[in-house]
Image (cartoon, helix red, strand yellow):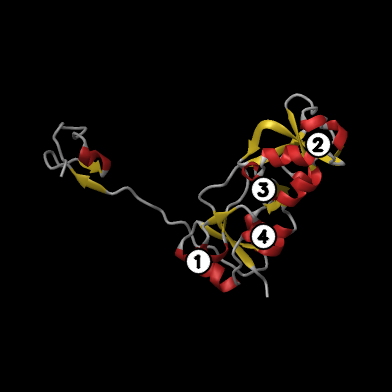
């Protein structure tokens, strides 16, 4: 049976999709920590709240990237583990995608996908990790790999494409229309916001 996850489409973290987390633990960018749903339950939730978008899990797994949250990196541990580290990555100081580190790649470019990061010999870091080039910080490869998680970049996926063949019909967005009323003094139409201001036509107050 196909599994689905639900995206909270109201906002992203950087360019990463946000998903409903397992066991009601809020929202997460970690695809492995996203709650799994049946097709029926995912569709039902979308009908209940149209901003919750169902995605086939397999589709996202095929297109995920790897990321390391800077909040999970303990610099004291980094320095301690750099001594004797055979391989390291280099990340850009002061640069993030959401909360995720940005890495130096083989072609000298930058990427927040750990899979694109260039691997360097540990000697690049120097004693105590202070030998990395300016603007770059070394972290042991094994440490970064252990902290990595699966995320989904918006540029790597297309929602309509993902739903082909699933039979899912998304709820249509509700069209909201501003409530309008009449001025108590001159009868001109005013919006809900204008009720707390002076009438734009006669200047009369309509505040409740």
Residues at marks 1 and 4, CA–CA distance in whole angstroms: 20 Å
Q: Is residue 47 left or right of residue 101?
A: left
Between circles 1 and 2, the one closer to the viewer is: 2
- Whether residues under marks 1 and 3 lie with C-beta atoms below 8 angstroms apart, the answer is no
Q: Is residue 148 visible?
A: no
Q: Residue at x 78, y 32 (%)?
A: 129
Instruction: Give the class, few, some or many, for how many residues have Cα within 10 Å of label 3's Cα (few <14, many ≥20).
Output: many
Name the residue carrying label 4.
Answer: 32
On the image, the x and y values in percent for residue 147 come to 71, 49
The vertical placement of 47 against 51, above or below, is below
The vertical placement of 56 against 140, above or below, is below
Earlier sequence position, callout 1 versus callout 2:
1
Q: Is residue 136 visible?
A: yes
Name the residue carrying label 1.
Answer: 45
Residues at marks 4 and 2, CA–CA distance in whole angstroms: 25 Å
On the image, the x and y values in percent for residue 123 come to 87, 33
Name the residue carrying label 2.
Answer: 105
Quadrant for the N terminus in the image: bottom right
Earlier sequence position, callout 1 versus callout 3:
1
Earlier sequence position, callout 1 versus callout 4:
4
Between circles 1 and 4, the one closer to the viewer is: 4
On the image, the x and y values in percent for residue 140 come to 79, 42
Residues at marks 3 and 4, CA–CA distance in whole angstroms: 15 Å
As rendered, which of 159 and 63 lies closer to the eye? 63
Name the residue carrying label 3.
Answer: 153
Quadrant for the C terminus in the image: top left
Residues at marks 1 and 2, CA–CA distance in whole angstroms: 40 Å
Corner quadrant of residue 6: bottom right
Q: Is residue 120 left or right of residue 184?
A: right
């Amino acid at each position: 049976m196909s599994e689905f996850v639900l995206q909270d489409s109201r906002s992203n973290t950087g360019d990463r999709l946000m998903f409903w987390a397992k066991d009601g633990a809020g929202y997460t960018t970690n695809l492995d920590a996203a709650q799994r749903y049946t097709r029926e339950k995912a569709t039902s939730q979308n009908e209940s709240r149209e901003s919750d978008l169902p995605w086939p899990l397999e589709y996202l797994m095929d297109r995920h990237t790897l990321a390391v949250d800077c909040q999970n990196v303990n610099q004291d541990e980094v320095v301690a583990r750099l001594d004797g580290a055979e391989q390291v990555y280099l990340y850009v100081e002061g640069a993030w995608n959401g909360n995720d580190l940005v890495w130096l790649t083989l072609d000298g470019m930058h990427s927040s996908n750990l899979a694109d990061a260039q691997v360097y010999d540990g000697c690049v870091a120097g004693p105590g990790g202070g030998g990395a080039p300016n603007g770059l910080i070394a972290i042991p490869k094994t440490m970064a790999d252990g902290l990595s998680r699966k995320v989904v970049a918006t540029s790597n996926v297309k929602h309509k494409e993902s739903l082909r063949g699933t039979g899912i019909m998304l709820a249509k967005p509700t069209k909201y229309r501003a409530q309008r009323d009449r001025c108590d003094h001159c009868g001109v139409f005013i919006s809900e916001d204008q009720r707390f201001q002076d009438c734009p036509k006669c200047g009369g107050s309509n505040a409740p």
